Amino acid sequence: MISQFFILSSKGDPLIYKDFRGDSGGRDVAELFYRKLTGLPGDESPVVMVTSGGEHHDDRHFIHIRHSGLYLVATTSENISPFSLLELLSRLATLLGDYCGSLSEGTISRNVALVYELLDEVLDYGYVQTTSMEMLRNFIQTEAVVSKPFSLFDLSSVGLFGAETQQSKVAPSSAASRPVLASRSDQSQKNEVFLDVVERLSVLIASNGSLLKVDVQGEIRLKSFLPSGSEMRIGLTEEFCVGKSELRGYGPGIRVDEVSFHSSVLLEEFESHRILRLQPPQGELTVMRYQLSDDLPSPLPFRLFPSVQWDRGSGRLQVYLKLRCDLPPKSQALNVRLHLPLPRGVVSLSQELSGPEQKAELGEGALRWDLPRVQGGSQLSGLFQMDVPGLPGPPGQGPSTSAPLGLGPASLSFELPRHTCSGLQVRFLRLAFRPCGNANPHKWVRHLSHSDAYVIRI
């Protein structure tokens, strides 16, 4: 079925290479794949590519996925369904994340022996044997080499499942970045469950401030360290409804346009009480996906009010930006960055910012304005003056308030902890699992929204 499987870094460095059939030209197959990938126009590469026969290679199909910056690639010379190989690659990515703690270049490099042992059990002569963790746990003997312990003082990055976040004053533990299976030398691992409601917000705002497009893509993600088959119940907002025709309760309701569930989710109580019941395996699982378009129940998190003035004679461009955060006063946005493309030829930048923690700089033909933390209900501003020699201007030599060619559109990136743009919330997470001893399982529920494409035309 499969001839080779390999994992490449984002720069094309081979991390893992496994030849199951010996019918290829060796490790240069990985180099051939990366050359074809980087030689394609555009940013989106096809998941299936074909190489024609040559001196060392027969006709070969490359099927790949990209996960956490890594390329997971399978090759075959047979005419088989690419969808089955894509499903296999996705399952392998999940297994590697569960066994190594997370899927990244560092964890793969530290656990090469474990990865090869896992591949030997999953695939035999290129044919799939099993991808069930319950089966594999009886055969995998190599223990994972975990990354450095989590520190409460190192909250620089925001991750899922409470692994490394700054959305909470107290991070729960390093459990989300450790392997799902406890090592044989340490059987005292805590029973923990992480449930994250994650939403990606896409917005397009016209230059006059009118909203042209809004889209929310949401997921409820679960990572369980409980024994497989432990029953749990997830209660969602009771006013949650699907479609415009369905109304629940007396309030405005929390509405989404589309929703889909994992095959293991039981929906007997969903229609009446908005409760999801499931018995998940150990590891990560996307419980539910949903989408909402063109109708948010709350105001957009940010509004930008730009003012542009430029003079053709002196080549001086002045941009005044006022950023208003329309989140509730008790909420906040983290890691806010405004990216504004500038006309070609900018040679200098002077700035006046509304706060000392803010930072602005020029880079790659654009202005970057960084705001580490923005409180709901606040307004921030920045005045930026630039010299652009030879900037083509409007008729006449006087100043103009219209945007010059090459300025904008502005884009925002940000994270909103404890906030969902759709309004969906998890009311409760209840476990039927009763461990031996007095210790109860630890439950962590997080809500997080972040920008996907938040664009404002100037």
Image (spheres, grey):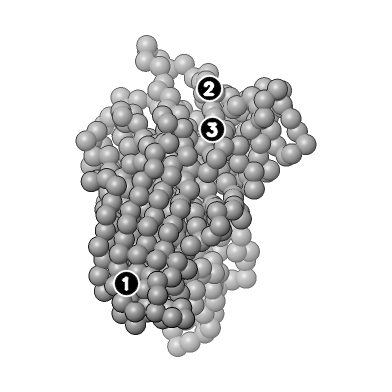
Identify the secondary structure beneath mark 2: strand
Quadrant housing the N terminus: bottom right
The type of residue carrying mark 3 is: Pro
The type of residue carrying mark 1 is: Arg
Q: Earlier in the sequence, mark 1 or mark 3?
A: 3
Separation of residues labelled 1 and 3 (CA atoms): 61 Å
- Quarter residue 391 falls in: bottom left
Q: What label does residue 316 carry, if any?
A: 1
Kindly identify the residue that appears in the image at 59 percent across and 27 percent down.
236
The type of residue carrying mark 2 is: Phe
Residue identifier under label 3: 280
Q: What label does residue 186 carry, if any?
A: none
Residue 262 in the figure: left or right of residue 338 = right
Kindly identify the residue that appears in the image at 41 percent across and 29 percent down.
330
Front label number (1 vs 3): 1
Residue identifier under label 2: 428
Kindly identify the residue that appears in the image at 36 percent across and 46 percent down.
380
Residue 154 in the image: x percent, y percent? Answer: 23, 39
